[in-house]
Amino acid sequence: MVVVTIAALLILSIALITDIRKQLIPNWLTACSFTLGVAYHAIANGVEGWIWTLGGAAVGFFPLLILYILKGIGAGDVKLFGAIGAWIGMLWVAQLMLYSILYAGAIAVLLLVTRRTFVKNIALAIVAIVAPNVSWSKGEWLSWAKSGKSFPFMLAVAPGAVTLWITSY
């Protein structure tokens, strides 16, 4: 269980940083995460682990694929949830998805009400906590807010993951 928690934390942390910085979740992250998740569970639990991990990947991937088709989220988010599902399984990835969507709705309301200023400050606070000594300029981290694009979904996934972790332990 410790390996799974550490892997999920690492994957989500990298995705958070890259999504806030570039509004992109790299394919190398999702492909490697999925492959390592399947391999880990197959080695640890044999055929049952392989079936369990593929079920988690499917539950993480397919519902968000619908949101992607409706242009609600990016393709990287869909692949990320498939990869995370391969690590944490069907139940936890479904809960993570639910919490993330609820947080995304709250953020969307905040964006509408505050015209992005408040959410930009929240993003800066997250950046200061996650990567306090980064060499990238603040403007690079918030290019999504300046461009008028939708916010990075990882801003909702991160608190969703914290909520899942707190409620699961």
Image: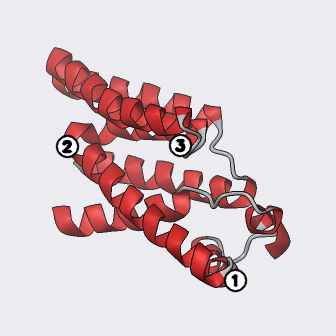
**Disc on the earlier residue, 1 or 3:** 3
**Disc on the earlier residue, 3 or 2:** 3
Spatial CA span between label 2 and label 1: 35 Å
The amino acid type of the residue labelled 3 equals Asp
Instruction: Give the mark toward the camera: 2 or 1.
Output: 1
Residues at discs 3 and 2 in contact (Cβ within 8 Å): no
The disc at residue 91 is 2
The amino acid type of the residue labelled 2 equals Leu
Q: Residue at x 77, y 63 (%)?
A: 148
Residue 168 at x, y percent in the picture: 18, 61
Judge whether 123 appears above or below 95 on screen: below
The disc at residue 77 is 3
Q: Quadrant of residue 16?
A: bottom right
* Image-based side of 94 in relation to 36, left or right: left
The disc at residue 117 is 1
| Callout 1 secondary element | helix
Mark 3 packing: few (<14 Cα in 10 Å), some, or many (20+)?
many
Judge whether 11 appears above or below 69 on screen: below
Residue 125 at x, y percent in the picture: 61, 82
**Could you say which is closer to the camera, residue 17 or residue 150?**
150
Q: Residue at x 49, y 37 (%)?
A: 78
Residue 26 at x, y percent in the picture: 65, 39
